[in-house]
Amino acid sequence: MFLAWIASLLKDDSTGGPLAAIDGKTLRRPHDSGNGLGPLHLVSAWATKSGKSLGQAVTEEKSNEITVIPELIERIDVKGATVTIDAMGCQKDIARNIIDAQGDDVLAVKDNHPKLHEAIQAVFSDERQGDLLRTRMCV
């Protein structure tokens, strides 16, 4: 019943479609340096409208964020939802997981994928984009 309730949180979003934001954060204070344990790093999925957590996963270090994002996607029902993830999660496998679950994704791209970043910049810096935007606004 708990998992059904969590799934319903995502579906209750009325912003034109459900939106789930996935992001990782390092909690700097909860650590145990005496036992060699560093800060806790959590990756969370949020239902943006309700402001409630859909799920969390712990990583050993920030670079492992990529490995736990697919776990979160499996835990929540993203069918028909838009999932946003920062540049750390901009990975082909993660995008494929969202698409396979019948969701949509908005993934940030930075220099972590230099060729893709350059290609996107080229498309949006093309002077013809202004003509395209004006054409769409007139329709």
Image: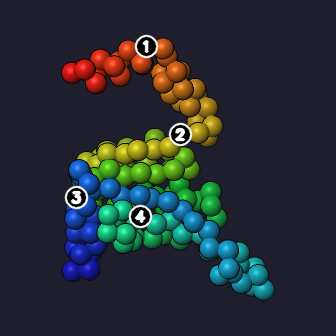
Query: Circle 2: is it few (<14), some (14-19), or many (20+) Cα within 10 Å?
Result: some
C-alpha separation, residue under disc 4 versus residue under disc 2: 19 Å
For numbered disc 3, what is the local secondary structure?
A: loop
Residue type for callout 2: Val
Tell me the quarter of the picture where residue 11 sits. bottom left
Give the distance between the C-alpha atoms of the residues marked 3 and 2, in whole angstroms: 27 Å
Q: Is residue 107 above or below residue 131?
A: below
Q: Identify residue for label 1.
A: 128
Residue at 28% across / 72% down in the picture? Answer: 6
Q: Amino acid at mark 1?
A: Arg
Q: Are marks 4 and 2 in contact (CB under 8 Å)?
A: no
Task: Characterize the local packing of mark 3: few (<14), some (14-19) or many (20 or more) Cα atoms within 10 angstroms.
Answer: few
Please, is residue 53 above or below residue 64 in the view? below
Name the residue type under label 3: Ser
Question: Which circle, 2 or 1, is nearer the viewer?
Answer: 1
Q: Position of residue 74 (x, y in %)?
A: 34, 61
**Disc marking residue 45:** 4
Q: Which residue is mark 3?
A: 14
**Separation (CA) of disc 4 from disc 3:** 18 Å
Question: Percent x, y for residue 105?
Answer: 37, 45
Q: Which residue is mark 2?
A: 109
Quarter of the picture holding the C terminus: top left
Q: CA distance from mark 1 to mark 4?
A: 37 Å
Percent position of residue 83, x then y: 37, 52
Q: Position of residue 57 (x, y in %)?
A: 48, 69
